[in-house]
């Protein structure tokens, strides 16, 4: 009986200890790389940065279709276009009238734009420019799955319930007695010996050759595992050519409606900081932008990767968040400035391709 009691106490103590460690050290309300990595340490918490909390632009669900809706810019994209209050706020500050399309019929904003083109959407919403954004790691894969015949019922866009992205959806899995009670301590123990994501984690830890990339000096770079897992598609030149050809078709169709297409492909964090990573930690050389930038485009391409690399080499800090896979307000400011420069150019420069 005594052995049974001692054994029971031992097995009970393990999840209790894990729960206590998680209560004090698990970084729940932090960036996605810390949350998905189940990390106990965050060298640069979001609370230490100045983040704007007031959204200034309109979203599609706030519009009244019985009224005239005229905008300078309609933005459509993934989390890089819906993260915080984004580059759209900066465009508003520059004097542009902006609306953001957040419907998320699918996880593919490029397909959603095609579905809008095939409907009467642009009879109800007038805009001079569309900023189409897709994160690099999904860009080629999204373009490989396009259906140019698909349409959408416009009324359904305004009847769907709208939700903000919230970190609360992660909280349930991080309660005292949950899967994280056992997995988080194991993950943090494993990170003492490996930099690749151990089981139950989605975050790489790479050593840095330059520890001044962020506001606080750090010798580590956190990277989302999909930046690496999608490298085969990202580096495939044939896929990239197909993607650009698809966007050329979309641009041509929008031009017939009097709308100009601006495309922005935010770089993956791994690709952007690749040259700053310790040589022994580099997994594979990224080549997407080498291929993409060499291609002829019939749309307005925002070369944000090149601008970010230039900013890095000029010691600009916090272009991306330390604890997150997304660009920070610094990166958003750079992107918005580049978009604005194209909006300010005379209309006739857009004729005949780019």
Image (cartoon, rainbow, N blue to C red):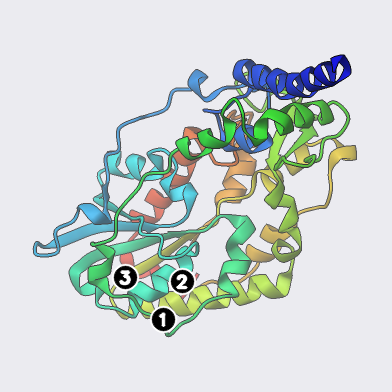
Q: Distance between the residues labelled 2 and 1?
A: 8 Å
**Front label number (3 vs 2):** 2
Q: How many labels does the image show?
A: 3
Residue farthest toward the front in the current orientation of the protein: 1
Pointers 1 and 3 in contact (CB under 8 A)? Answer: no
Q: Between 221 and 310, which is closer to the camera in this rendering?
A: 221
Q: Which mark is residue 185?
A: none
Where residue 316 sits: x, y (%)?
A: 59, 30
Q: Quadrant of residue 233?
A: bottom right
Residue under the image location 27 percent in, 68 percent down: 156
**Which label's residue is closer to the chain start, 1 or 3?**
1
Pointers 3 and 2 in contact (CB under 8 A)? Answer: no
Q: Residue 111 carries which label?
A: 2
Where residue 168 sits: x, y (%)?
A: 46, 35
Q: Between 10 and 172, which is closer to the camera in this rendering?
A: 10
Residue under the image location 43 percent in, 49 percent down: 81
Residue assigned mark 3: 259
Q: Distance between the residues labelled 3 and 2?
A: 17 Å
Under circle 2, the secondary element is helix
Q: Quadrant of residue 85?
A: top left
Q: Mark 1 packing: few (<14 Cα in 10 Å), some, or many (20+)? A: some
Under circle 3, the secondary element is loop
Under circle 1, the secondary element is loop
**Which label's residue is closer to the chain start, 3 or 2?**
2
Q: Mark 2 packing: few (<14 Cα in 10 Å), some, or many (20+)? A: many
Q: Which mark is residue 150?
A: 1
Residue farthest toward the left in the current orientation of the protein: 67
Direction from residue 162 to residue 28 in the image, left or right: right
Pointers 2 and 1 in contact (CB under 8 A)? Answer: yes
**Which label's residue is closer to the chain start, 2 or 1?**
2
Q: Mark 3 packing: few (<14 Cα in 10 Å), some, or many (20+)? A: some
């Amino acid at each position: 009986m005594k052995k049974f009691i001692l054994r029971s106490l031992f097995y009970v103590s393990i999840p209790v200890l894990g729960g206590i460690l998680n209560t004090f050290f698990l970084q729940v309300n932090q960036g996605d790389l810390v949350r998905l990595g189940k990390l106990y340490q965050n060298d640069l918490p979001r609370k230490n940065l100045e983040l704007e909390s007031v959204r200034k632009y309109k979203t599609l669900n706030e519009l009244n279709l019985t009224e005239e809706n005229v905008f300078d810019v309609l933005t459509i994209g993934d989390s890089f276009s819906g993260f915080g209050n984004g580059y759209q706020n900066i465009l508003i500050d520059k004097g542009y009238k902006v609306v953001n399309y957040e419907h998320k019929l699918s996880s593919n904003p490029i397909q959603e734009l095609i579905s809008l083109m095939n409907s009467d959407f642009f009879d109800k919403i007038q805009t001079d420019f569309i900023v189409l954004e897709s994160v690099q790691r999904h860009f080629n894969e999204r373009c490989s799955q396009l259906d140019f015949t698909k349409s959408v019922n416009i009324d359904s866009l305004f009847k769907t319930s709208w939700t903000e992205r919230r970190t609360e959806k992660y909280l349930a899995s991080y309660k005292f007695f949950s899967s994280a009670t056992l997995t988080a301590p194991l993950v943090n123990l494993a990170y003492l010996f490996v930099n690749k994501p151990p089981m139950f984690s989605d975050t790489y830890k790479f050593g840095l050759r330059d520890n001044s990339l962020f506001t606080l000096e750090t010798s580590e770079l956190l990277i989302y595992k999909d930046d690496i897992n999608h490298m085969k598609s990202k580096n495939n030149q044939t896929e990239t050519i197909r993607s650009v050809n698809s966007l050329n078709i979309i641009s041509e169709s929008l031009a017939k409606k009097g709308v100009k297409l601006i495309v922005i492909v935010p770089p993956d964090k791994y690709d952007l900081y690749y040259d700053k990573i310790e040589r022994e930690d580099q997994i594979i050389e990224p080549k997407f932008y080498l291929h993409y930038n060499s291609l002829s485009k019939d749309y307005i391409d925002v070369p944000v990767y090149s601008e970010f690399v230039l900013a890095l080499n000029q010691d600009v800090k916090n272009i991306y968040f330390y604890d997150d896979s997304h660009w920070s307000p610094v990166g958003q400011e750079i992107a918005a400035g580049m978009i604005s420069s194209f909006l300010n150019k005379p209309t006739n420069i857009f004729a005949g391709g780019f």
